[in-house]
Image (spheres, rainbow, N blue to C red):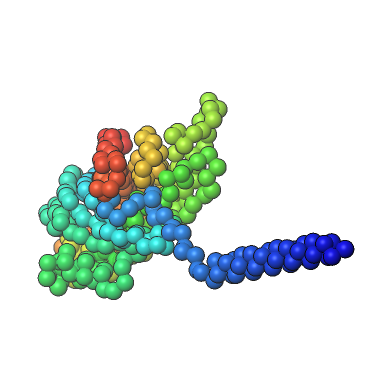
Amino acid sequence: MCLSRVVLSIMVLMLTSLQIRVHGFQDVKAAAEVTDESVPQAPVPTPPVWKLQAGDSFLVLSRLYRRTVINFPDQPPAPLETEDWQQLRYTVDTVSPAGDATFSIEVQDASRQSRGQASRAWKAGAADLQKLTGFRLWLQVDPEGRAALPPGDSYQTSLQKLAGGDDEYAEFLRVACPEELLLSWFERPFWLPRRDMIQPQMQERTVGVVENIGPFGLLRCDAVLRIQAAAPNGEQPTPATISLQISGTPRFLPLPLGDAATTPAAKVNLPVTDIRVTEASLTGLIKPTSIRSATARPPFESILTEISAKGTLKLAATSASAVAASELPFELQQQREIRITSIIFAENRTERLLRLPVLPPEPQ
């Protein structure tokens, strides 16, 4: 009887000890869970455009072709054609955890060719364009491809650098090249900020476009990017065969007019007193890249936009008073094309250089 009591007491003690251990383990586990929840988790960095890294760079070849016809009375049409070429180098300076990338953009080369009835002032624009060579600015681009100049007075600073200390020329640049135009030029490669965007199921995307149409003014447009219609042979489209159409209806914004030396029209010896655009359209095409790479690169090979505009203008009183008193019809066709020609990756990349084919310009 005594032995049974001893055995029963030992069993009770063992169960009590086990229960204490189980409760103690649960208390420690609960405390650990509370501790884990109280420690803030590090945010996952957002990848920047094309998943680029600091130190990566790419080269852009930009071509602008413009054909302008002003119909003077009793004279045959005399078209003026200009073709501007620029090579730009974009280099990733920094990338924030939010995916905002700061790019340093350098104009490595700039040139112009003029054809047709070009005045000496129009041809002199080639010298002004060459001043861009070596010009550098900074651009901040978020993961969705939206670009902005860095905070501060970067726009005015850029104009002063371009003007080389010439205040009158700086004022001309401010009139002829407002900040929204400068942004539209340099942000264009980021219209498609992710490598996998060109897909058969891609949703329409709207991008802002601002173009200058010579000395007349600006055209501003909310352009729509959409998948091009399927091929007539009925083949299933793939990312390598899909192109994007660009379309929109621009709104005309005239530049300041007059005979002051800082107005664009006066710069090219065209003293316009009034100008109206009666028709304007914007079309274009984005071609997908023919190179598929696992590393960072844009999803397109080229971006082409075309603008057509018609309108009338009046000239200031000159020796040709009959011309000055009448409205002169004008027509303008303009093409702007950019191509990514090469990508140079930072030293920590396994793929150092990716060169892309540079195709000849589109036929006129």
Q: Is residue 115 above or below residue 156?
A: above
Q: Is residue 275 above or below residue 226?
A: below
Decide which of 267, 331 is in the foreground and name it: 267
Is residue 208 at least partly visible in the picture? no
Decide which of 177, 312 is in the foreground and name it: 177
Q: Quadrant of residue 174?
A: bottom left
Q: Left of 11 or right of it: where is 336?
A: left
Q: Left of 158 or right of it: where is 362?
A: right
Q: Position of residue 282 (x, y in %)?
A: 41, 50
Is residue 130 at least partly visible in the picture? yes
Q: Quadrant of residue 4?
A: bottom right
* Residue shown at 70% from the left, 66% from the top: 17
Quarter of the image for the N terminus: give it.
bottom right
Decide which of 352, 330 is in the foreground and name it: 352
Q: Position of residue 147 (x, y in %)?
A: 37, 61
Q: Residue furthest front?
A: 2
* Residue shown at 54% from the left, 48% from the top: 203
* Residue shown at 15% from the left, 56% from the top: 134
Q: Position of residue 182 (x, y in %)?
A: 29, 61
Quarter of the image for the C terminus: give it.
top left
Q: Left of 39 or right of it: where is 309?
A: left
